[in-house]
Amino acid sequence: MEIHIIGNNVGGTFTAQNIRKQNGDAEIHIYSEENHNYYTRIKLPEIISEQMIIDDLIVFKQEWYDHNRINTHLNSKITKIDPEAKTFLIENGEQISYDKLVLAIGSHPNIPPITNARESVGKGVFTLRNIEDALEIRQYIKKNHCEKAIIIGGGLLGLELSKQIKNCGLDTRVVEFFPRLLPRQLDVDCANMLEQEVEEMGIEVELDAKTDKILANDTIEGILLKNGVIYEADIIFIQAGVKPNVSLAKEAGIDVNKGIVVNEYLEASKKDIYAVGDCIEFNSQTWGIIPACIEQSEIAASSILGKKEEKYKGTTPKTTLKIVGIDLTSVGVHDPEEVGGGWEILKKADRTSNCYQKIVLKDNKLKGAILFGKKDAVSFVNKNIESEVSIEEIRKAIEAYIYKCSNCGAKYDEAKKDISFNDLPEDWQCPKCGSSKDKFSKIEE
């Protein structure tokens, strides 16, 4: 069986790996437009600041591909797929036949409808999606002696980019459309903590800021916000999310909507064609996260090999990484719209050390969490997501305690308050009897 995978990214590479784990005989080929084997994109900003070299980003070296007998074809752009003939065409004119075809064609940067944005890409306005982008940006900063930078987009990659651009010595400003940073990963309280950390790095943050226009004559001059405010810049980055790549599939007559439409076995609408990763749409939803790519790759590999015991049901949103040098884990439903009706929140907000831990329950099941600045509870959350847990287990995991007044018996429950007990001011008094803070002691409950 000849299995051909278009896309040497997370979805494509792990699909190949999972096929090889289950089948030692299949002939596996991976095609990539780029000149590099699979690498981690979250570290791309560190290429710009020269804190990393390209080789540091490569996840699997060539020896890994050789050992697993996975054939890689770099600099190979696929221009056409013929599902009826079961062939595809490489830009160099070579036509390839397949038994099974996997589309792991990823996504591309979203450019919002900002006046002059598209026309200015590559001329002082940049998106960061691959190694070539990072090298081009680095060269532009040096060649043009850039001093001021604006990052439009306060998401994960936008914030990491802002840190590395600041490390390059540029005055750096993040302009975020939403009223808080990382709106998909954080609640308001935690986003405020993150904003404080970012600003302490010397990075300006503008929230609820809608960019209307890129200002440019011969060179980039800055941006105009919809409220009339102007910010100057020599270089501008747009990091406003991504959109699935669907054109190759669409031209082949494969069903697409927001992404390439797949069923629970990751099968596309044409026989023997599968799709995984950022490019897919399942149950009207798209994913742009690594955990989804890995989960899909496992199911797709089994499906390709004729084993259909496991079905894809969607992936619980999960982010675990260091963002601007701070540990962050965000899993599942972390900010329910209405508390009540079975929803319950326990949290530990340590504002002195800027650590925030929040656990979300529904009907005693762990439905989501935010762990910011501290990662001790990560294993507990990963192990118990969607499982029943006790309040005692949660308290222990996030180190949230109950303090009791020795005078009147009043209790201060850290898990139900917006501030940890130790962060309370020294002149704080018991709201029930007026006793001082030192009259309270930690209890086991």
Image (spheres, rainbow, N blue to C red):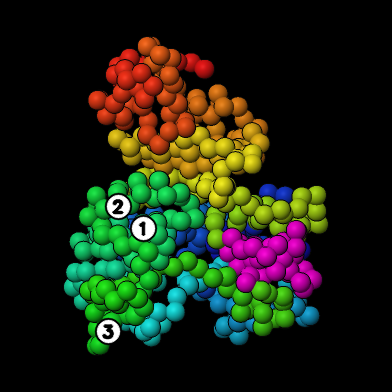
Q: Are marks 1 and 2 in contact (CB under 8 Å)?
A: yes
Left or right: residue 202 compared with residue 210:
left
Residue 394, image x, y percentages = 53, 29
Question: Which tag, 1 or 2, sits closer to the chain's start?
Answer: 1
Crowding at dot 1, Cα within 10 Å, few <14 / some 14-19 / many 20+, comes out as many
Residue 143, image x, y percentages = 22, 75
Q: Residue at x 54, y 70 (%)?
A: 243
Q: Residue at x 40, y 79 (%)?
A: 114
Residue 98, image x, y percentages = 73, 72
In what element is the residue under mark 1? helix
Question: Which tag, 1 or 3, sits closer to the chain's start?
Answer: 1
**Which residue, given by chain and number where applicable, does mark 1 sit on?**
159
Residue 73, image x, y percentages = 56, 69
**Which residue, given by chain and number where applicable, does mark 2 sit on?**
198
Residue at the far top in the pictured view: 406
Residue 47 visible to the viewer: no
Looking at the picture, tell me which residue is in the foreground, 429 or 193. Answer: 429
Tell me the amino acid under the disc marked 1: Leu
The quarter of the displayed image where residue 209 is located: bottom left
Left or right: residue 409 compared with residue 426:
right
Rendered view: 146 above or below 1? below
Q: Residue at x 45, y 50 (%)?
A: 186
